[in-house]
Image: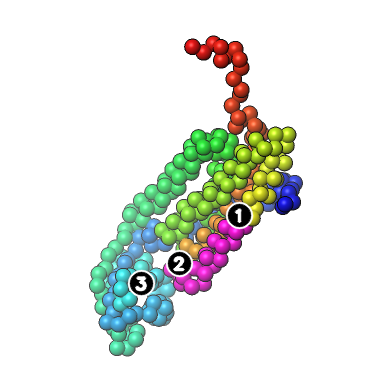
Amino acid sequence: MLRTINFMGVRNVAFGFTMVLTVLALFSWFHKGLNYGLDFTGGTLIELTYEKPADVTLVRNELVKAGYHEAIVQSFGATTDLLVRMPGEDPQLGHQVAEALQKVGGDNPASVKRVEFVGPQVGEELRDQGGLGMLMALAGIMIYLAFRFQWKFGVGAIVSLIHDVIVTVGILAYFQITFDLTVLAAVLAIIGYSLNDTIVVFDRVRENFRVLRKASLIENINVSTTQTLLRTMATSISTLLAIAALMIFGGDNLWGFSLALFIGVLAGTYSSIYIANVVLIWLNLNSEDLIPPATTGKEVDDRP
């Protein structure tokens, strides 16, 4: 039988670490700001087509040599098609890029298939809608947990998820990782992952209120967290290994996405233990919150 680990014995130390990390993340977020990608700031989209399969890394290096340091190159559809994203709305930009890439591959010249502009207003709308979608997701989660468990569980889960988002975005802001739609998708995925891990612990805490009737809330949380520890470790480690492979082999286009997921999984695993559970202690969760009071005999007799 697995020995119970006293997780909550160091909850005050964990709280201090959480506060320091959260403050640093918020400071980085507001001081440095996010390095928004072209999805949010606007820019030019250039679709190139080649006679033969194109080398994305080679094309990117050639653009850097030509002075287009902020260009983002990715495969688009067939292996002979590439999509180049870069700031600016110069109508001649597409042709200039094509000329700069004529020497790539020698006998495999590039031709412009289409040039489109993403205005700053469209990018601002995407940013606002992404933030609104995140808030709606958090509100929906709290409502679900309030009905599924009890409102105190909902508060604990929301505080945990907010911590995960703040820490992830704060680290991205500190290192000025490009924040585009793929990174936003990663942040939303983090919310779902962290919530799943938190619900597993919460469900065991609720079950143990019926099994460990004489145990205190802290003892209950320690037992419940220990019982779910192996499951949490297996899920987190396997997920981190998959994300690490994506970081190594996914290329530059998926670097921000995979890095955000990696940070979020670590933060989510930590918060499901030392934030969500601690909030339950602060709110003084007890068995009366989960088990309805017994019906008295007089109440039964009064019923028609």
> Where residue 300 is drawn, which disc sits there?
none
For label 3, the SS is strand
Front tag of 1 and 2: 1
Q: Earlier in the sequence, mark 2 or mark 3?
A: 3
> Horizontal placement of 83 versus 264: left or right?
left
The kind of residue on which mark 1 rests is: Arg
Question: Which residue sits at x=56%, y=15%?
Answer: 300
At 46% from the left and 70% from the top, the residue drawn is 250
Colour basis: rainbow
Q: Residue at x 63, y 29 (%)?
A: 288
Does the magenta segment cover residue 243?
Answer: yes
Density class for disc 3 (Cα within 10 Å; few <14, some 14-19, many ≥20) is some
Mark 1–mark 2 distance (CA, rounded to whole Å): 28 Å
How many numbered discs, if any? 3
Give the residue at mark 2: 254
Mark 3–mark 1 distance (CA, rounded to whole Å)? 38 Å
**Which residue is disc 3 drawn over?**
75
Instruction: Report the side of 96 relative to 251 (left or right).
Output: left
Residue extending farthest to the bottom is 106
Q: Main secondary structure of the magenta part?
A: helix
- Answer above or below: position of 266 versus 303: below
Please provide percent x and percent y for residue 286.
65, 32
Query: Are the residues tagged 3 and 1 within 8 Å (C-beta)?
Result: no
Is residue 109 or residue 31 the one in the foreground?
A: 109
Q: CA distance from mark 2 to mark 3?
A: 12 Å
Tell me the element at label 1. helix
> Mark 1 Cα within 10 Å, few/some/many (few <14, many 20+)?
few
The answer to if 180 sits in the magenta stretch is no
Q: Which residues are magenta?
A: 232-254
The residue where tag 1 is placed is 231
